[in-house]
Amino acid sequence: MSSVQITFRSVSYSSAIECHIDKNYNKLKRIYRKINHCRVVIDREQNHRLKGKIFSVSINMTILGKKISSRKQNQNLYIALRNGFTAIEKLLEKQFKRKIKAVKKYPLAFSEYNIHSELQSY
């Protein structure tokens, strides 16, 4: 069971769009298991002056009490969804790299070096 809340504004509901969103969310959920909630809002802006009708996708996620959001626009809904989830994935990578850098790791080669130097001294 996924915890994705999808809202359609000025766009008719489509199970294909919902399936596409669930697929992208489950991909992120496999990599980043600490995602608590995801909200996707799909809106269609009417009569854009230069580009005509544009889809706007807003993705909001809650992970470990922090909110991450992305808003992308495109004439094609699937491209807007792809760009939105790509931006969220980059933000999640950035968030988790900060936590990994906070934990100091000792290199394995250092401990192997000490073992080899002790064996050579005998």
Image (spheres, rainbow, N blue to C red):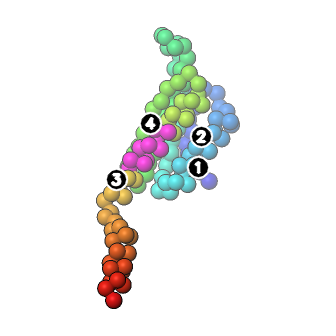
**How many C-alpha atoms fall within 10 Å of the one at disc 2: few (<14), some, or many (≥20)?**
many
Q: Is residue 72 left or right of residue 118?
A: right
Q: Which quarter of the rendered picture does the C terminus lie within? A: bottom left
Q: In this figure, which residue is indicated by the disc labeled 2?
A: 21
In the rendered image, is residue 42 in sight? no
The residue sitting at 52% across, 14% down in the picture is 51
Which element is circle 1 on?
Answer: helix
Q: In this figure, which residue is indicated by the disc labeled 4?
A: 70
Q: Give the residue type at disc 2.
A: Ile
Q: In this figure, which residue is indicated by the disc labeled 1?
A: 26
The residues bearing labels 3 and 1 have C-alpha atoms spaced at a distance of 23 Å
The residues bearing labels 3 and 2 have C-alpha atoms spaced at a distance of 27 Å
Q: Which mark is residue 98?
A: 3
The residue sitting at 31% across, 64% down in the picture is 104
Q: Is residue 78 left or right of residue 113?
A: right
Q: Are marks 3 and 2 in contact (CB under 8 Å)?
A: no
Closer to the chain start, of discs 2 and 4, is 2
Q: Considering only vertical position in the picture, is 66 above or below 45?
A: below
Asked if the stretch drawn in magenta spans residue 19, the answer is: no
Q: Nearer the viewer, residue 99 or 25?
A: 99
